[in-house]
Image (cartoon, rainbow, N blue to C red):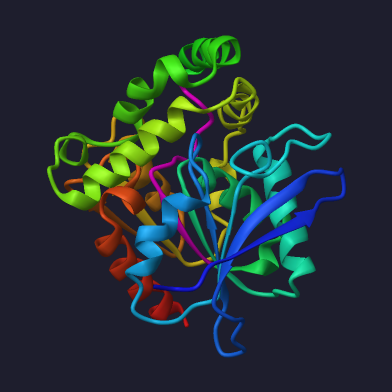
Amino acid sequence: MKRISPQYLMLPDGAQLHYVEMGQPCASRPSVLMLHSLFFNADMFQPMIQSLQNEWHIICPDHRNQGLSTAGQKAATMRQLAEDYAFLAQALSLSSLHVVGSSMGGYVAQELMQCAPQLVCSAVLSCCTSLAEQQKERFDQLEALLRRDGGAPYASTLLETMFGDAFLNSTEPAALVQREQWRSFFGALPSDIANSVNGVFSRPDYQSYLASNRTPHFLISGALDRAKKPADMEHMNSLLPDSTHTVFEHSGHTPPVEAPEMFARQIEHFWNQVN
């Protein structure tokens, strides 16, 4: 079991950024920044991290306004979150990062590669897109419902959106534990999670930046994803100069939770190639 150290950092606008840190910085290879999906927190990466074969210095923050991080004075836009993580890297004296972004975290990673390109030596993006939101009206309604009710009435709906049928129907003990953990977590989401929903679905289009982005990318899709299709990431793959795309056949929208061992094995192979 890898040792986890919880930490807090005061951001310039007064927000308290919660993050967990594992391992020690190493001069011979970059640290790893893992950015979670909307409705989750940094815990979503824990089963996958435990499956990594090598020791890495890993930072897993809770996005502002999610998990144990506070909202601060600034809106939780994708650009603001990227600026938060550039500030975190500076505070920790980190000059080079492997960035892993799942869904919402993938949008933050794309912003980070724009506002602090010198920081990012590789990017693993899972189940996101380079497009602005194409179903804005649908998510305006979700934002309004969550702002009114919080997560409790919608825990099952979120579970079915964030995970594929193979994971939802699995009788494996690990899957059962994870399902109940996230059902409980989604049900306890406060009404201000709607502010984070707004940040995700108000994101800009990133397509025009991809052709000039020379950062090595590894793109991961879930064949059973109900929120984003593999075609979304294949489109991104076609625009990036240095990119590989793979599809997890038995995963939905959250492969780090649904297939942690496979996710760990593939991203570690990618990092070793980049290093």
Q: Is residue 148 above or below residue 227?
A: above
Residue 196: % across, % down: 61, 30
In this rendering, would 42 be left or right of 258?
Answer: right
Q: Which is more toward the observer, 32 or 275?
A: 32
Q: Quadrant of residue 271?
A: bottom left
Q: Is residue 157 above or below residue 177?
A: above
Whether residue 248 can be seen here: no
Residue 124 colored in magenta in the image: yes
Q: Quadrant of residue 263?
A: bottom left
- Identified at 36% across, 61% down, the residue is 48
Q: Which residues are drawn in magenta? A: 122-134
- Identified at 61% across, 81% down, the residue is 25
Q: Which is more toward the observer, 212 or 103?
A: 103
- Identified at 59% across, 27% down, the residue is 193
In this rendering, would 176 be left or right of 89?
Answer: left
* Quadrant of the drawing holding the N terminus: bottom left
Whether residue 132 can be seen here: yes
In this rendering, would 93 be left or right of 6?
Answer: right
Q: Quadrant of residue 70?
A: top right
In this rendering, would 131 be left or right of 52?
Answer: right
Magenta highlight: main SS: loop
Residue 274: % across, % down: 45, 78
